[in-house]
Image: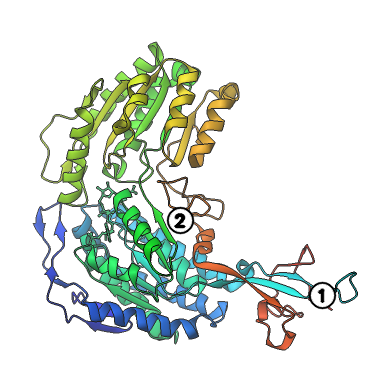
Amino acid sequence: MITGKNYIGNQLIASGNKTYKTFNPESNQENKYLFTEAAQEEINKAVELASKAFKEYRTISGKRKSEFLNVVANEIVALGDELIQIYCSESGLPEGRAKGERGRTIFQLRSFADLVKEGSWVEATIDTAIPDREPNPKSDLRKMNIPLGPVVVFGASNFPLAYSTAGGDTAAALAAGCPVIVKSHPMHAGTGELIASAIIKAAEKTGMPNGIFSNLNSSGIEVGQQLVAHPKVKAVGFTGSIRGGRALLDLAAKREEPIPVFAEMGSINPVIMLPKALKNRAESLASTYAGSITLGTGQFCTNPGLILGLKGKNLTTFINSLAHKITEINPTCMLHPNIVGAYESSKTKALNQEGLTIAANYEGKIKPNYASQVVTTVEGKTFLDNPTLHQEIFGPYSMVVQCENEEQLEKIISSLEGQLTGTVISDANEVANYPAVIASLQNRVGRIIFNGVPTGVEVCPSMVHGGPYPASTDSRFTAVGINSIKRWIRPFSYQDWPNEILPKELKNENPLHILRSVNNILTKKGIV
Ligand code: NAP
């Protein structure tokens, strides 16, 4: 049941006086529930509780954290159709997408549950003492990963489940041993509250300390700012706009104790169409890309917003075919009128730039909050000279850049801001003839795709969902997959610490049977 209140630990509270409703973009009307924004005292209480809970939660075994995360997943399943209905009514996204995203969220939770149950993620590293080393004896040093402390997670507008309340950031932080305070995204506050209720139920059922999770409502930037500035918050996870992510990064850097902000932000995901591939399959590539550009109404951080090719007949065939195919696709709903507004204004700004040609612009009648898809094209030089054309347009929009030659193509790639992905469309080994282009691309992106589309992010250990700024604020980490746990931990060393009081992970006997590095050898064996 949705109450509109904040979860401050396991208590539902709404003492503030600022209220708001969510909006159904498909029916173009407000939803019925009234949400109360978290008041200053509630924000402080949530952080204080998290800080207190951390003292116990950081010592809880991997087995118990695993049980907790699995019960969160079970409780989300138990929410049943109510969750799917509220998700659709607050996002305009179809039921199939809601169910798929719920499946991904559950998979993520269970993956982290498995990770912490197995235990080797702490990367235990042991260098035993050499008491008779000359000229000085060597100490015994033992290192493992430990949690940072309370983490604030900002829910993402475009992933109401998989990157919001119990999404990847929350699952990773809870797995690491960090309490989480979620700043719920105002566009899907009801979905957020239902998921929060599942987390709180699971925490109670598995005996977790009160305060390891709170869910705060807000309809403006103040709640998030207060959370990030709170001295007891130790790290931040964010998915959204460059403007929002950058503001939070700067705020965190200005604190007396600066803290890390792991923000996953904008990306235009360049796609390089090599000449032979275009010559042989321009039509089929156009179909594939019309689908990828419009998938989810273009509201994916991996949306292909930039397509690069060498000028000529084959690229022209591709552009014409893409224009034809994309206008045959029926427009779909965006997440919220504000997102439609942002799409329309950034699109208009781009269309007004000199030298830009509109290749396709869906001109049929569309319902309120729907987005019409657009494809534009420019010359390579025009793109290089105008940084406005490099900016993300969040929605079903893509631009094809017609490069003069390979040298210009490489120059364009080098001029791009950091990106989540780069894609190469190649005919068999054609790509091998473009080493400089590929090297430039690798320097700008977090993941490179061969003969595919950038949309669709697999959740697995080898996934990198991040990239040089502004794709993310720290390209050394991924936001997707079990390795995202590394954002919420720090390495910690014990020197000459007695075996009896070392954590289990580092004891001589290796009672948890985890994989450890002992004197530079990876082993599960104990130390005799
Ligand atoms: P957003 O504006 O970046 O907001 C995300 C969250 O951060 C919201 O909860 C927002 O709070 C908060 N926030 C924003 N600026 C803040 C600040 N200065 N201080 C503290 N908190 C701040 O993103 P959005 O609402 O999801 O969508 C807006 C635009 O972001 C989209 O049109 C799109 O361009 C971009 N976006 C990009 C991606 C991507 O993956 N590349 C994903 C989502 C959105 P309030 O909402 O309460 O103000």
Q: Can residue 85 be seen in this view?
A: no
Residue at 72% x, 82% y is 497
- Pinpoint residue 325: horizontal percent, then vertical percent: 28, 26
Q: Nearer the viewer, residue 360 or 507?
A: 507
Label 2: element kind? loop
For residue 62, side relative to residue 21 (left or right): right
Of the numbered discs in the image, which one, if any, rests on residue 479? Answer: 2
Ligand 1 shows up in which quadrant of the image? bottom left
Question: Mark 2 and mark 1 in contact (Cβ < 8 Å)?
Answer: no
Q: Which of 383 and 400 is in front in this view?
A: 383
Color theme of the render: rainbow
Residue at 75% x, 80% y is 496
Q: Which of marks 1 and 2 is nearer the N terminus?
A: 1
Q: Quadrant location of the C terminus?
A: bottom right
- Pinpoint residue 415: horizontal percent, then vertical percent: 43, 31
Q: Quadrant location of the N terminus?
A: bottom left
Q: Name the residue under label 1.
A: 129
Quadrant of the image occupied by residue 223 = bottom left
* Name of the residue lying farthest toward the top: 313
Quadrant of the image occupied by residue 323 = top left
Residue at 46% x, 36% y is 422
For residue 114, side relative to residue 244 (left or right): right
Residue 500 to residue 441: above or below: below
Label 1: element kind? loop
Instruction: Tell me how far mark 1 sits from mark 2, CA to CA.
Output: 37 Å
Q: Which amino acid does label 2 sit on?
A: Ala
Q: Depth-wise, is mark 1 or mark 2 nearer the camera?
A: 1
Q: Which amino acid does label 1 sit on?
A: Ala
Quadrant of the image occupied by residue 291 = top left
For residue 176, side relative to residue 356 (left or right): right
The crowd level at tag 2 (other Cα within 10 Å; few <14, some 14-19, many 20+) is: many
